[in-house]
Image (tube, rainbow, N blue to C red):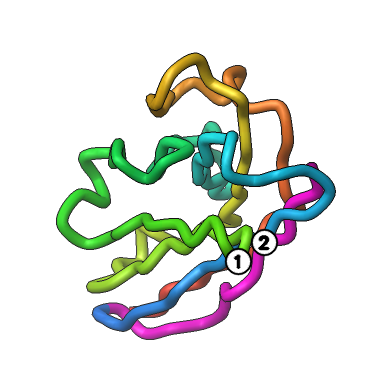
Amino acid sequence: VQLQASGGGLVQAGGSLRLSCVASGRPFSSYAVGWFRLAPGKEREFVAAISWSGYSTDYADSVKGRFTIRRDNAKNTVYLQMNSLKTEDTAVYYCSAGALSGDYTSRNPLAYNYWGQGTQVTVSS
């Protein structure tokens, strides 16, 4: 599976962005998808995840209530809608896909076999 993340950019605090993760190469519908982010000087951080069916979702406490993850398997795409952005959301965002057992999600990056190239999100004050 090849993943292409896009939608990042520069936005003021309080603004919104929508990230997209488009998959190619294999049927996307059998994979859970996770979004992670990496900020300078920090460790990689789990952001959100969605199960293969879309039934199960999970969010980091830091983004819960502000970010929404959803998927459109017909379009091989997972979206991360980010609202009420804060300066601390600044990071490179990566999408990942993994064939998890069952219709579940995971916060563990090791559960995901495929990774996109990342898209930069910069939130200014």
| Front tag of 1 and 2 | 1
Residue at (57%, 73%) from the top-left corner? 8
The answer to whether residue 99 is magenta is no
Indicate the secondary structure of the residue bearing disc 1: helix
Q: Main secondary structure of the magenta part?
A: strand
Q: What amino acid type is highlighted by mark number 1?
A: Lys
Q: Position of residue 57 (x, y in %)?
A: 30, 40
Name the residue nearer the viewer: 57 or 102: 102
Q: Is residue 112 above or below residue 93?
A: above
Vertical side of 56 occupied by 39: above or below:
below
Q: Position of residue 55 (x, y in %)?
A: 30, 41
Give the labeled residue for mark 2. 22
Query: The magenta stretch spans which residues?
Result: 1-13
**Residue at label 1?**
75
Q: Quadrant of the N terminus?
A: top right
Amino acid residing under circle 2:
Val
Packing grade of label 1 (10 A; few <14, some 14-19, many >=20) is few
Task: Judge by depth and name the residue closer to the eye, 41 or 112.
Answer: 112
Earlier in the chain: of badge 1 and badge 2, it is: 2
Q: Residue furthest top?
A: 101
Please name the residue shown 45% across and 74% down the image.
Answer: 18
Residue 10 lies within the magenta run: yes
Provide residue 114's location: percent of width, then percent of height: 73, 35
Q: Secondary structure at mark 2?
A: strand
Q: Quadrant of the C terminus?
A: bottom left
